[in-house]
Image: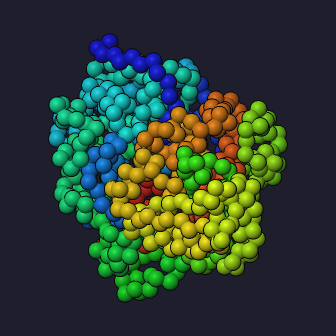
Amino acid sequence: MTGIITKMAFQSGGIVAFCRTAVAVLATASLAHAQPQHGIAMYGDPALPPDFVSLPYANADAPKGGRIVTAEVGGYDSLNPFILKGSVSWQLRYFVGETLMARSLDEPFTLYGLLAESIETGPNREWVEFTLRPEARFSDGSPVTIEDVMWSYETLGTIGHPRYLGFWTRVESMEQTGERSVRFTFNVEDRELALLAGMRPILKKAQWDGVNFADSTLDIVPITSSPYVIDRFDAGRSISLRRNPDYWGVDVPFQQGLHNFDEVRIEFFGDETAAFEAFKTLEVNTNREFNVARWESQYDFPAARNGDVVMSVLPHERPSGMTGFVMNTRRAQFADWRVRDALIHAFNFDFINEAMTGSAQPRITSYWSNSPLAMDHGPATGRVLEFLEPFAEDLIPGTIEGYTLPQGDGSERNRAGTATALAQMESAGWTVQNGVLRDEAGNPFTFEILLEQGSSENQAIIDMYTQALGRIGVTPRISTVDGAQYKERTDAYDFDMTFYRVAVSLSPGNEQYNYFGSDSAAQPGGRNTMGIASPAVDAMIDRLLTSESQDDFVAAVQALDRILTAGRYVIPIYQWNISRIAHARELRYPETLPIFGDWPGWQPDLWWYED
């Protein structure tokens, strides 16, 4: 043993896990392998054999060259995506964060070797060991060493972005076991930790000697081993990444057919309108469209008519997740579930959906809607009921009895929803007095809706919502701020209501603690945006992580879905069960789509440029 770091603390956390729609694969877990393997699956064995030559959804013969240009609304003031400080392009960590293992988008949560040539686990996955590939190199040509790996894990786990902290607190020890091998031993029983251990970015330790890692902004470009390096940037306006011609991993099976563009460029715009105009002239050559009405009515511009732009509709098999407007329960007025229920009833979804999409998008009905893990909207029964009953006294009405989102009649006035909203507000101590909703002391009910500058769709939705709120005597304050201020405020939970989006998978795991766990509610920069701190939620997450049967796993997720949905924390809007991407005709993608379709790791990773 040449080095060891020991830790004793415990805190929940993790990352998003992925799983095939066939939830039955979760039924049983195969015994951990007693010898080094080429990959690892959460349940069962990896689908691809040790001698696989490429991913089944990749075009191994894709040509190299050309460039892809994407648009982001807002700006940036940092090039370090691994820390909390600063505003950074959301795409950047996917380009410069190479990891020991890489995730397949077409299997249950399964990883294959990337920087690591092999993985080995204990009989019960109480430890995991990785062996580095001897050829692994950073972009400056220096070798990736175990010292770099250990420094990266400790640094990210202590002063890195909060998304890395939870895993580190579950590591009992980290030790170098050979010239190219490192072992992590865990302090809790959790089969997922062996996979999460392979998913942390590896940075070059020497670059950060004498530097405050947590404070870096635009002054340092992180050195990594990834296929792309940051070539040029214009602060707040653009970032250009160049494919590294000396990339060490060109022969790694997982990378065959990936990372084909010579340049990936990110352009930043002040608002969605400017970004769309740039796409219409192909200054930006790919555009992901979330508004079906715009897709059907505003893509009749010259480049689309003459075939220079292709409109691709791509299916996927993912759960809906939750998208909408979240209420911050850390605020006194939103701590009462009746107030949250009233604001959901006042939100005239049917009218808004017609105005925004022509009623073409179905509404999200729960966090796992559009999947086998979704809650039943009727009364809880069976194992779901059994799991919830110990917490019955503390659960919000509807969790056990059954809960369904209100449905309007499609009219602008939404009389039934307005009436229910007023009744709920009255039960919570708020009544309309001289046209204004007030409490017994005469204080008006008001709150702030925080929006990020440039989000024209969200602004349009909130404009209609504001008119509806006026019918119950509420006039919210609308604050629109730039990207940096928006991030600063949301990281500090300095908002009443704001836009919210969380993706969930068919193999939920430790990441649920970060999204909804009590320990994350007060953690700055975390994902528990609504501030939920519920023993029942924590218990359901514990159950889904320790379930030994498919039935218990599904029941635990469905019970969690009930608690979250009936908790009325978010005003849901519409879901996207397909992806719509308009792109230059020269941009191509494989005919075989992974089950997660358009997802991180698919564009631009698998695309290529072809005249």
The residue located at (26%, 25%) in the rendering is 147
Measured as percent of width and height from the top left, residue 420 is found at 75, 64
Asked if one can make out residue 211 in the rendered structure from this viewpoint, the answer is: yes
Would residue 443 appear left or right of 241 to someone viewing this image? right
Determine the image quadrant of residue 5: top left
Q: Is 290 drawn above or below residue 511 in the view shown? A: below
Place of residue 394 in the rendered image (x, y in percent of width and height, measured from the top left) = 73, 38
Q: What residue is at 29 percent from the left and 65 percent from the top?
A: 267
In this rendering, the answer to whether 238 lies above or below 158 is: below
Question: Residue at 18% across / 31% down in the picture?
Answer: 209
Location of residue 78 with respect to 604 vertically, above or below: above
Q: Nearer the viewer, residue 45 or 550?
A: 550
User: Which quarter shows the C terminus?
Assistant: bottom left
Query: Which residue is nearer to you in this view: 325 or 384?
Result: 325
Quick check: can you spot residue 35?
no
Query: Residue 525 occupies which quadrant of the picture?
Result: top left
* Figure disc tally: 0
Residue found 43% across the figure and 56% down from its top: 602
397 relative to 455 in the view: left or right: right
